[in-house]
Amino acid sequence: MMLRPRWIGALLFALALAAGFAGLGQWQLERAIESGKAVEAPTETVLPLSQVAQPNGPMTDKSVGQLVRFTGTFVAGDDQLLYDRINDGRTGWWVVSHVDVDAGDGHRIALAVARGWAPDEATAKSVMARLAEQPGTPQTIVGRILPDEQPQVPDDKKNPTAMKTLGVGQLYNLWTGVDGMDVYNAYVVDRSAPAGLVKIDSPPPIQQTELNWLNLFYAAEWIIFAGFAIFLWYRLVRDAKQREDEERELAAEEAAAAAGGGARAHAGNVE
């Protein structure tokens, strides 16, 4: 049945159609994979802070983790400590400073800068004391900008001002001379550290990938169409075979009935 030229031709057509559908499915799958590749963000290219973030507003996803450069002045005496900060797998303390960023035309913007890490509170406080005595002179700072963190209730109830997260709002309330000043709702991890502190480990952000599910759906749809083309050919052949078998059985029954009727008529004539 299946070896008849008509069905062989239909099979070749179904196979060609299935191959076309499979090719389209592969193309859609490649599109899904290509669109799902992480686009390398240029976070390691140092950009001016003014191009990356604006004061008094949230950061964009594209800006998170960007290396920035700016000119600012460290405000003496406005340094704060953060505890339970992990650096290269070790828990310790951060020293966070208040910097007045020079935005031009005498305009200053407050910014939090994480200066460095210390393994214990005593070391961190000794560095803070030394930084408080340094004159406030403008300098160029390079670091990685990150969004500020949500405040947390301190573990030590006896020290309600202790901080373990870098919340700009908390720091702003502790800084001096910032009333009415604009502020960045972000902080910068300094790429260098002052003497006595360890440079804070701040790797570039991990690039997220997201598959294009619409393309994946189309790819699966074309594969289903390819399988359906072969299945349709099989059903047509099977239905044709069943129809021919039924016709042969019916013809055989009619022939048998005709033969039986002729035999009875011949017997009647003999009598």
Image (cartoon, rainbow, N blue to C red):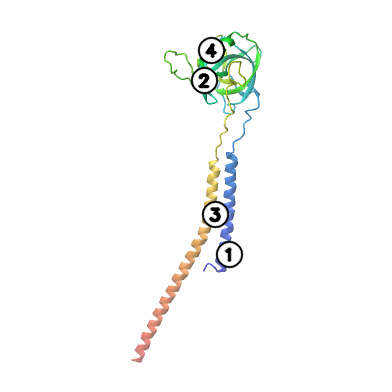
Q: Mark 3: which amino acid? A: Ala
Q: Earlier in the sequence, mark 4 or mark 2?
A: 2
Q: Mark 1: which amino acid? A: Gly
Q: Distance between the residues labelled 1 and 2?
A: 77 Å
Q: Distance between the residues labelled 3 and 4?
A: 71 Å
**Badge 4 density bin: few <14, some 14–19, many ≥20, Cα 10 Å:** some
**Badge 1 density bin: few <14, some 14–19, many ≥20, Cα 10 Å:** few
Residue found at the far bottom of this picture: 270
- Residue 48 placement (x, y as % from top left): 65, 22
Establish if 216 lies above or below 73. below
Q: Mark 4 points at which residue?
A: 125
Give the image quarter of residue 193.
top right
Q: Mark 4: which amino acid? A: Lys
- Residue 14 placement (x, y as % from top left): 56, 59
Q: Distance between the residues labelled 3 and 1?
A: 17 Å
**Badge 3 density bin: few <14, some 14–19, many ≥20, Cα 10 Å:** many
Q: Name the residue under label 2.
A: 92
Establish if 38 lies above or below 6. above
Give the image quarter of residue 256.
bottom left
